[in-house]
């Protein structure tokens, strides 16, 4: 689907409209953002074109504000990890009518516009389920505030593009959070989407730029695209535009960011975000915060992946600021911020009130900053166009499989689980009774015959003389060891350790009366548990950044320094 009108004067949050690459000096051989990225890429989908224009077409990667709590004389806003899109509530005298007014500001849309949705994750035996929220930064120029912050008036009224896309995965036990960014220049399939408001059908594209999905019916098409790409169910989405980014940074008095050298994101022909900072750490807010988030020319190698790394640094820093210092005491400022934030936000229909957004922020708050890991989906240059990217199959699959399996990306979770002591010491192996059930039918096929008998025999060979087959069929995707009470936790862990089953899969459950091993569909054959070989840390190519790392600093691209 080719788009007309390369926006040469535009520059928005994380999306470099042109996507071109600068040469080492400030005179890119192809003419800045208006160069090759401004040309139409090959159209394997039969309808894909580029969106030329200035660097930046980006909107905030992380959505905006969070609802605060009312107090008699002073309001304190505390955002938890990544609640950048959660709106603010708490102005003086804000009663029911004002609450309803803020609710009416929030735009709502259908969650998924595709034909096929990925099923929700099932709860673990403890009744816990993970949360997956898609954060979308829109490059919309359809308000006076957004237009003032960048872009051409010719863009008013055109379909927005999803220049920032981040999947936020909150683990079932709320101990960790994984964030996966998708560079907007990445070529991926986009499924068929039907606009919920007009009924217009957008045919599937075999390959198209990732940011096009938002203009094909709305954020529900971006959700459908992510589910197709990742096979992960998306519970909610949040879309924020430029003005929300600026008001958020203003509200907390600036977000500290760091560059290793003086940086000026500007090319000889006027492209670039315009960001100009001295080497070291500087708190940015307002327009300067927006410039940081949309800068591509000037960071690392000048590609879109460098921009996602800068966004991760900013978001981590904002989370730390909000958790430590986010205090506002001016009711007028609070009211203005609440208005701006709610008007800048679009969410799915099930998340469309301040109360629901606040409840979601409470879930985010449970995750410590050290449990947050920011990553970028591993990509490589597309052979047909060096200005485009495609997922790096092996590494991208590894990263996404870890998110699907609810595995922490930093590697620490696996280490802690391996060393996790139990308050209940295990009995001698020969005295531990273990019932083994066949759960291999979870994948839609018939259960693998005799799996419970085979694994019970393996346990007996390892010294668990009382291991026995239980004929109950209990379909389960992952092999799990269940125990009913604290006095059997040590026994359950001992059985798991003997088989190589991770302690993360040892769970307390009232559904069993003793230590029970359910052989899942991930172990259909063999005597050794294959899950032990699964990755425990995000691949190096994902550029993982931990939420506690407060000394991160962006490398400046050659040719974009000054002084």
Image (spheres, grey):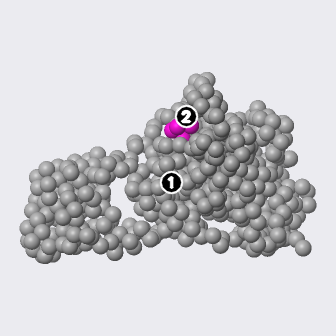
Q: Determine the main secondary structure of the stretch shown in magenta.
A: helix
Residue at horizontal 11 percent and vertical 65 percent from the top: 433
Q: Is residue 174 visible?
A: yes
In the image, is 476 to the left or to the right of 75? left
Front residue of 246 and 198: 246
Identify whether 45 is placed above or below 508: above
State if disc 2 and disc 1 touch (CB < 8 Å): no
The image shows residue 488 at horizontal and vertical percentages of 18, 64
Q: Between label 1 and label 2, give the one nearer the viewer.
A: 1
Q: Position of residue 234 (x, y in %)?
A: 48, 44
- Asked which quadrant contains residue 317, the reply is bottom right
The tag on residue 365 is 1
Q: Is residue 465 covered in magenta?
A: no
**Residue at mark 2:** 352
Q: Does residue 222 appear to the left or right of 338 in the view shown? A: left
As drawn, 454 above or below 114:
below
Q: Which residues are magenta?
A: 352-357
The earlier-in-sequence mark between 1 and 2 is 2
Q: Which x, y percent locates residue 171?
A: 43, 55
Residue occupying image coordinates x 74% and y 51%: 250
């Amino acid at each position: 689907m080719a788009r007309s009108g390369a926006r040469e004067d535009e520059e928005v949050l994380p999306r470099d409209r042109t996507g071109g690459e600068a040469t080492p000096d400030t005179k890119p051989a192809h003419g800045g953002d208006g160069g090759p990225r401004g040309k139409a890429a090959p159209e394997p989908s039969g309808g894909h074109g580029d969106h030329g224009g200035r660097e930046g077409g980006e909107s905030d990667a992380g959505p905006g504000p969070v609802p605060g709590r009312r107090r008699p004389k002073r309001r304190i806003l505390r955002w938890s990890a990544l609640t950048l899109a959660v709106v603010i509530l708490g102005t003086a005298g804000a009663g029911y009518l004002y609450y309803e007014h803020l609710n009416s500001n929030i735009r709502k849309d259908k969650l998924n516009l595709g034909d096929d949705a990925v099923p929700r994750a099932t709860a673990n035996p403890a009744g816990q389920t993970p949360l997956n929220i898609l954060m979308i930064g829109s490059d919309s120029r359809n308000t006076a505030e957004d237009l003032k912050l960048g872009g051409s008036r010719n863009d008013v009224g055109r379909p927005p593009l999803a220049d920032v896309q981040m999947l936020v995965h909150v683990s079932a036990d709320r101990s960790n959070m994984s964030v996966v960014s998708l560079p907007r220049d990445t070529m991926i399939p986009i499924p068929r989407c039907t606009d919920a408001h007009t009924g217009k059908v957008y045919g599937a594209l075999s390959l198209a730029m990732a940011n096009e999905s938002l203009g094909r019916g709305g954020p529900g098409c971006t959700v459908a695209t992510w589910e197709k790409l990742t096979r992960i169910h998306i519970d909610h989405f949040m879309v924020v535009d430029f003005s929300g980014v600026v008001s958020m940074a203003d509200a907390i008095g600036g977000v500290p960011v760091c560059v290793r050298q003086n940086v000026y994101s500007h090319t000889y022909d006027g492209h670039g975000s315009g960001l100009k900072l001295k080497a070291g750490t500087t708190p940015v807010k307002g327009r300067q915060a927006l410039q940081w988030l949309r800068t591509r020319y000037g960071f690392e190698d000048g590609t879109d992946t460098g921009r996602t790394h800068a966004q991760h640094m900013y978001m981590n820093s904002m989370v730390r600021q909000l958790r430590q210092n986010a205090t506002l005491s001016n009711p007028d400022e609070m009211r203005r911020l609440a208005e701006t934030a709610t008007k800048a936000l679009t969410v799915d229909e099930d998340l469309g009130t301040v109360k629901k957004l606040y409840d979601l922020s409470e879930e985010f708050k449970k995750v410590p900053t050290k449990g947050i890991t920011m990553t970028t989906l591993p990509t490589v240059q597309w052979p047909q166009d060096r200005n485009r990217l495609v997922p790096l199959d092996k590494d991208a699959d590894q990263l996404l499989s870890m998110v699907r399996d609810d595995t922490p990306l930093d590697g620490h979770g696996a280490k802690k689980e391996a060393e996790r002591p139990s308050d209940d010491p295990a009995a001698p192996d020969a005295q531990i009774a273990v019932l083994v059930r066949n759960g291999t039918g979870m994948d839609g096929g018939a259960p693998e015959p005799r799996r419970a008998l085979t694994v019970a025999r393996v346990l007996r060979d390892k010294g668990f003389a009382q291991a026995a087959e239980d004929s109950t069929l209990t379909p389960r995707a992952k092999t799990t060891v269940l125990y009913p009470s604290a006095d059997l936790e040590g026994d359950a862990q001992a059985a798991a350790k003997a088989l190589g089953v991770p302690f993360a899969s040892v769970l307390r459950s009232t559904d069993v009366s003793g230590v029970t091993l359910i052989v899942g569909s991930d172990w259909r054959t063999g005597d050794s548990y294959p899950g032990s070989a699964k990755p425990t840390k995000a691949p190096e190519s994902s550029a993982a950044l931990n939420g506690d790392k407060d000394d991160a600093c962006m490398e400046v691209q050659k040719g974009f320094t000054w002084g």
